[in-house]
Amino acid sequence: MPVMSVQDEVLSRLKKNHIDFSVYNHDPVSTMEECLSLPFVHDQVMFCKNILLCNRQKTDYYLYLTPPDKPFRTADVSKKLQTARLSFAPQEVLPELLHLESGSLSPFGLWWDTAHRVTLVVDSEIRSAPILAFHPCDHTATVLLTQEAFFKQVVPALGSIMIELTVPRIAE
């Protein structure tokens, strides 16, 4: 029996959970600029920036979802989470924690975090777009979901703790 790709596993889990979605296959994209230039991304779609953070001891991990154009400072998120200053998690932890590689970071990877070591942290600004876009743990495809499908179906199916934050925009 052939082994399913991570992308196929994500799509299978979405279908199994009766979650409505669209999927688009495309050439690999590595930057937010490349993601935003994909032909199916328009003003109703928010391609979320996904950032994996951790504390200094690498015992607490946070997957932070934020708008693509929002400036990011770890100090702002750390303060809102009331935790010691966070930093970017090392890329080496991605396969172990979330079953994915750098460039494919996605909340769907939380399905493989069975120990629930990663907390999902959502910037409240992502609720401003009707449709959210994420890679299915593979940067050669993109899944589009409505806000309702993501927050009412995907997040509970992930089984992770979710924290929603309102992080003010900083002056650039």
Image: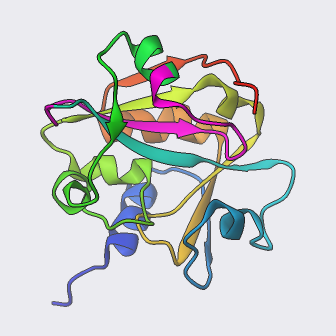
Name which quarter of the figure residue 79 lies in: top left
Residue placed most toward the observer, 147 or 105: 105
Of 29 and 136, the residue lying toward us? 29
Q: Which residues are magenta?
A: 57-75
Asked if the magenta segment contains residue 149, the reply would be no
Give coordinates of residue 169: x percent, y percent.
Answer: 71, 24
Of 172 and 108, which appears nearest the observer? Answer: 172
Please indicate whether residue 143 sits to the left or right of residue 116 in the image.
Answer: right
Residue 12 image position (x, y, % from top left): 38, 66
Q: Looking at the image, which residue sits at the far top?
A: 82
Please, is residue 95 above or below residue 133 in the view? below
Residue farthest to the front?
172
Instruction: Name the quadrant containing residue 115.
Output: top left
The spot of residue 112 in percent (x, y) is 22, 52
Residue at 53% in and 31% down: 73
Give the residue at x 83% y 48%. 44
Is 66 one of the magenta-colored residues?
Answer: yes
Q: Is residue 4 left or right of residue 68?
A: left
Image height check: is 159 above or below 89? Answer: above
Q: Tell me the residue at 75%/33% (across/down).
A: 172
Number of numbered discs on residues: 0
Quadrant of the rendering where the N terminus is positioned: bottom left
Position of residue 150 relative to residue 38, above or below, is above
Question: Percent from the top left, x then y, of residue 135?
Answer: 51, 63
135 to the left or right of 87: right
Q: Residue reaching furthest right?
A: 43
Task: Pick whichever, 103 or 142, lies toward us.
Answer: 103
Q: What residue lies at 38% left-to-right and 74% top-to-bottom?
A: 8
